[in-house]
Structures are given as C-alpha cells and as structure tokens.
Amino acid sequence: MATITGAKGGSQKQHTPVEQPDSAQSMARCRMLLVLGEGEFAGGLDATRIFLDGTPLGNADGTMNFENVSWEFRPGTQTQTPIPGFPAVENETTVGVSLTKVTPWTRAISNTQIDAVLVRIGIPGLQQQENDGDIVGTTVQYHIDLAVDGGVYSTVMTKTITEKLSSLYELTHRINLPKASTGWQIRVVRDTADSTSQMLQNKTQVQAITEVIDARLRYPHTALLYVSFNAKSFSNIPKISCKPKGRVIRIPQNYDPIARTYSGTWDGTFKWGWTNNPAWIWFDILTEPRFGLGRRVTPAMLDKWELYRIAQRCDQKVPDGKGGSGTEPRFMFDVYIQAQADAWQVIKDIAAGFNGMTFWGNNMFNVVSDMPADTSKLQILTRASVVGKPTYSSGSEKNRYSSALINFSDPDNHYQDRTTAVMFPDLVKQFKFKQTQLTAIGCTRESEAQRRGGWAVYSNSLDRIITVQTGLDGFAYVPGTVFAFADERLSGRVYGGRITEYNAALKSVTTDRGTSAVPGDTLMIRTQGGTVESRTIQAVNGQQLILATAFTAEPLPNAIFVIDAGQLRLQYFRVTNLTFNDEENTYSITGAEYNGAKYDAVDNNARLDTPPISLIPTGLVGQPSNIAISSYDSVRQGQRIATMVASWDAPVDKNGKPQADIVAYQAQWKRGDNEWINIPETGLRNIEVSGIYSGDYLVRVRAINSGGASSLWASSVLTHLTGRTGGVPKPVGLRTTAINWGIQIDWSFPADTGDTLQTELQYSVNGSGNNPLLLAGVPYPQHTYTQLGLKAGQEFWYRARLVDRIGNQSDWTGWVRGESNANADDYLGDIADDFLTSADGDRLTSDIDT
C-alpha cells in the first residue's frame, strides 16, 4: 500500500491601502478694491446691496450667505481715510494657463510705474499612488525668471513644494522689479517633469498676475468699495456688484429728494443732496468741472427756472401701471456712466429721460421738455402775420407706428436689459401693426419704459409739420415754444387777423375783417403785458367783438388776434427749429404738431382725440352704416303707444376712423308703400317715431358734413313692427259747393282722428284723376277750403286724405266733381252791386241825381 505524506501550508497577510491626509490647505484670500465712480456718493450700502456672482453678502434678517467676507466703503470725499490692509495699489489680471515643463509661461510688462508683481501659482492636486495602493504626497518644483528691458533672464526665485494635496492649493510670489526703461519680462518655468501616469498628480498652472504700486492712498473724490473673501469659496474670482446711491449733486434749496416735494417758492439757490431726478442730473453734468462741462459752461448759461419747472413735472405722481390706486414719480434716471463719451450725446441722452431737447442759442444752453404748454408763453400767428404761404408736410404712412418694444434695465435681474411692449389698438386700425424699438436710457421701471414707448408712438402719429416765415414777431420764439396758427384757407372759416381798435370801457375789440366768430368762442390777443390773453366772446356785431371781461393790459397796436371756436379748433405747433434770415430780416419757424391730450393718453391711457381743424370737405362723404330698426311700447294716458327706434353707425374714413367733419344726419321713414316722411336734421345717430301703426317699415339716412355736402342714402332692411292696427281713417262726406268765381270743398272727420295734423287736398281736370296736383294742406281741425279765381262754370275733380302728427297718411277718398257757378244773373247782380258801391258808382249816381 502506498503511503501519502504532506505538510500544512501557510499564506502572507493582505495589505489594506491607505490615503495620507492633506498636509497643507490653501489660505489665499482675494482682496479687491473697486472704484465705483467720481465722488461724493450718497452710499446707502449694506450687506444686502453687495453681490458676489449675483448673490448678496447678507439677507434682510441679518444672516450672511458667505463666511469670512469683509467689506468697507468710502463715499469719495476730499478727506476720506485710506482703507486698512491696502498698503499698495494692485491690479490683478486673470491668466488661468497650465504650466508644463515643455512650455514655460511668459508675460511682458510695459508699465514702468509699478514696483512689483505678484505671481499666483495654483496646484490642483499633489499626490501619487504607490504600488501597494497607498496615496501619499509628492514633490513639484518651479522657478521664476526675470529679464529687464529685453535682456537675458535671471532666476529670481525657486520653489519646491513637497506636500500631499487633494484640492487646489495656491501660492503667491512677490517679485520686486528693478528700474527699467521699457519694461520687464516674467517667465515661470516648471522644473519637475510632467506626469505621464494617472497614479501621479502634480499639475501646475499660472492663476493670475498682479501689478503692484507700493502706496497707501486714500483716493480723494473717488467712491471705493473694498471686498475681501477666502479664495477657496470660489473656483474663479467672482463678479462683484453693488447697488449704491450715486453722486451727491446740486439740488434746489427747497427740494426734498426723498419725498420729491418742493416747499414754498424757490429762491434760486442750491444745496447738496442725492436725487435721481433727470433734470438735476442734467444740470450736474453740465456744471461739474471735474468730469462734466463745468469748465466751459457756467450756471449763468443755463435757464435754471425752466429746469425747475421740468424737474417738478418729473416728480409728479402718475399711475404705476400695476392696477389700483398706486402711483410713482413720472421720470427717474438711474444711470452708470462707465466710459468717456461725446459730451453733446451724453446731455442729449439725459434730456431724453424727461422727453427733452437740448440746444445752444443766445449764448446759453437751453433745454425744453415735451410737456403741456405754459400758457404764459403761448404765441399766436395768422396768415396776416406771415410772409408768403405756410408749408405743411408730414411723414410717410410707412413710418407710422402702432406699437413699440422698449429696452430698460431691470433691477430684479441685476440691471440686465429686459424688453417690454406697448400697443395701441386705435393706431393699429389706422396704420396696421407696425412696430418700432427703442432703448430707454436710465430707465429701471417697466411702467416708465411703457410710458416712454407710448410717448414715442403717439409723437410719431402726430407728425404734421408746418414751416412759416414771419417778421419781428419771430423774435419771441425759441425751440419748444407752442404757438397757435389760424389759417382760413385750411379751416374754411376766418378766425384770425389784426385788431384796429380796443375799447376797454365797452370791452370791445374791432377787427380788420369780418370773422366767423359766434358768442361763446375764445378770443386770443397778445397784450402789452407781453403775454397772450384769452377772453370769451359775449356778442358779435359785425367786425366788433364784445368780450365778457376786459383784458388786464391793453393789446398792442394792430395786434394779431386768433379765435378758438367750439366746433373748430386752432392748429397748435411746438417750435423745433428757428432760423433768422439776414437778407430778408425774417424768421423761418418750423413746428411739429402739438396736441395737449397726448400727455393724459401717455400717463393715464386716456383716449387721444384729434380736434377738428377744418370745415372744408375732404372729399366724398361716406354713408352711414348698420341702420337698425326696432320698437318699444309705452303707456300714455292709459293708452298703449308703440314707438319706432332707428339707429346707425357714423361713416368712416379710409383708416377706419369716424369721419371728423360729419356734423348732422338726415333721416326719412315710410310704412309699406306710403311716401317717405322727413325727420328734422339731427346730430345724433338715432331717431324715434311715436304712435306708429303695425306694418313693414323702412328707414334711410344720409350724412351731412361741415361744408353742407351730403352722402348717398343708406337704407335699412324692411322690418315689420307692431303698433296700432289698421291705419289713419279717411275723411268722410267730401263734397263741393259752387260759388261765384270758385268752388268750396267741405268734409268731415271720422272718429278717433284727434291726432290729425292736416288734411291734404288734390285736384285734377278730369274724373280719371290723371296728373293730380296738390291743392292745399289744411290744418286740423279746419274742414272747409275755398278755391277761388276760377272762370264761371269751370270744372275740377277733388280728393282728400288725412295726415297725422308723425306723418302717417290715410288712403285717398274717391274723386268728387266740383264746378264754379255758371248762372249769369248771379254774376251780373254781383257786378252791379260791386260797381254801385264803388267810388265810380258813387260819382255816376250823383250825376244822375243832379
């Protein structure tokens, strides 16, 4: 038997890999000093108004969103203190380039004013995995070389790092710079070979380079924000932003910029304060000598009183567009000017913040705003005061807009641009959907952006332009002046001229021509007080106008007058350009259409009505449309009365808007086959006819314009209405009686004819009734009529019908024969009696008696 023998075997214990802990942590802090702007700033900064990558440092409840963050603010005063921890002026530039042994990193520096540079090196990880699986530290080495004025490089420092790192580790090296004429070249060289294995991590990269000027500065007149935070909190340097209140500027002494109110009367002096009222920002840009135009423009070259009026309008409360009764200031201007720009363009952009216009004239910087006209500065013109003919023009319909897209800065999205839209249905009907786009500079509210868009669209629609030449009257005009112009060739009425006499005692004005004025119209004259005064006309006596009240000052001799009538308004324009013609000693004035209703339409979304300026027919008068007939019942004195109602729509022009020159309508109606019955002219678009009978009714209407021209008739559809049954009863007992030289016609009224208006009589030369003629309409309740002037024995045939008070007609009676008296004895007796009782008969009988 075989014997098997053996021995017990054993095995080595298995190794468990371990990772060595990190031996170092990056303790780099990011310190940033930001120049906010030219001081002094009002500030108002706290942790909720400073942001890192869009996130506020703190919250309203006092909690912080970041750890180990500190900040300081300097408003930019002359005597502000330096910020602690900043012994130098540093300007960091992000690099973020990988550093390899094969490719060193180099940078040329040309700013010879700096004292040193800071090179920040980053090591994303520094570790290696050994064969037994353990993860331990390793070593990496690099050095920095410096060359002066393009010379040879020399090593200024060498760095060896032996650590275990699993996350980004940063080191900052200061390199002091020797004096140079043209600059330096910095080179960072990696000495350690690049890793070729995943088991070895020793990458290096150049994070940033910072130029340094050694100085502890306080930066007078410069608003500063200093922020410091731990670099490990961010993978890259975050974007820092803030919401401070901006510059402290000159504002009126009586102005409260927070409440936006003005107390008492302004004495013309200023104080320093913060505001975002665009009028005072415009004033600051022009008068500030450090960065504005203050070295060339003095306050005396600005009309601060007009600016004060504009500023008050900017602060007026308007609906905030959110529904309800909420209000907000009309205009605010929040803008951050970050770069040098053309001065004229900057002040134009700021003036646009209050719908303004800037121009240079009379050695002054002038500013005007498109706002309701100052009546104390209103001017007037007529054809009697212009040279030649006025010239009218307007833009192409292709350039008329009905909608707008407006870009504004949205504070809820860190002032990134956002777009809002406005659209006006009335203008869409007129011009179709045509959209413009604009940028509302300095606007941070959607509601204000929509108001600016509405202003732009409405101003675009009011684009009639006038150009006139006038004499020395033009001296009183400047761009922005609003003037009224009376042009009888356009209006079709005489509403302007010159006065020849003014009688203060009689409160009368005598004009140089007959006018179309009526009591209730408004007379406007420039007086010796320098203003245009308006008075209501109480009576008109030829060329003499009697006023309700006298003028406060005597009108100028041969002064211009204009009349603003109720049914016909004057044309109003705002001056946009003014030129003096040296050779002719005249002023050329160009004005854009002015409509005072525009501002209420922009602020309150009110309807923009265009007042009528002409009574001259513009062409074919359109027909009324949609004529509808209906009826209703009412009870009067215990009887049911049926009333017909007819209504219609006004004629429209080619743009789909109601024709502006329609002043009245003519209407007619009829029942069945009866004749058309007229209704008195009316300015309404409906009529009522009471007491109708049952039957089928038609109504037709035509429009009449201010020139008296009428449209074609427009008819309704045949409509059956229920009213009184039957019809108007016929006269009864129609009969004739022969009289000398004539025929007497008599008739009687049947029952239920108390509403009769008249009895119509017709006559014919034969019994067939061919070509009947109207004899008379005899008022009710007369029931007899005599036709005289006939020959003896002359024969006619008669018939009659009744007409009630609303025009309903009865049927005609049958024809009745009538004949004038044919008995000669009756005529001879009458002749003898008539002759003997006459003066000639008296003389004859007296001669016979003698």
Image (spheres, grey):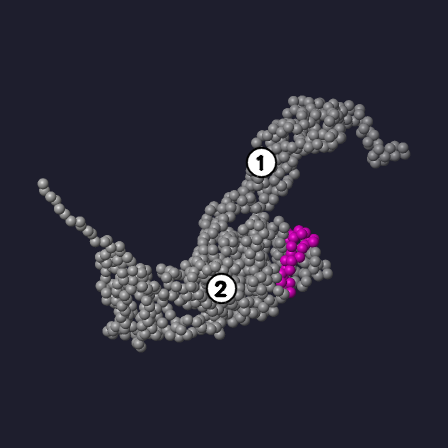
Image location (x, y in percent) of residue 724: 67, 27
**Where residue 470 appears, x then y in whole percent?**
55, 61
Q: Residues within 10 Å of mark 2 (few under 14, many from 20)?
A: some
The quadrant where residue 141 appears? bottom left
- Nearest the viewer among 288 and 514 is 288
Q: Secondary structure at mark 1?
A: strand
The residue range painted magenta reads: 514-540
Q: Residue furthest bottom?
A: 179
Mark 2 vs mark 1: which is more N-terminal? 2
Q: Nearer the viewer, mark 2 or mark 1?
A: 2
Q: Nearer the viewer, residue 239 or 789?
A: 239
Identify which residue is drawn at 65% across, 62% down: 555
Q: Amino acid at mark 2?
A: Leu
**For residue 74, side relative to residue 681 (left or right):** left
Q: Nearer the viewer, residue 528 or 101?
A: 101
Residue found at x 41% / y 66%: 228
- On whether residue 438 falls in the magenta region, the answer is no
From the image, which quarter does the N terminus lie in?
top left
How far, Cα to Cα, is label 2 from label 1? Answer: 68 Å
Residue 640, given in percent of the width and then of the height, sits at 70, 30
Q: Is residue 166 visible?
A: yes
Amino acid identity at mark 1: Ile
Q: Residue at x 28, y 57 (%)?
A: 18
Residue 69 sits in which quadrant?
bottom left
Identify residue for label 1. 627
Q: Decide if residue 365 is in sight here.
A: no
Spot the residue most to the right. Answer: 850
At x 24% / y 73%, what residue is drawn? 152
Q: Which residue is mark 2?
A: 45
Task: Name the residue nearer the viewer: 387 or 68.
Answer: 68
Q: Secondary structure at mark 2?
A: loop
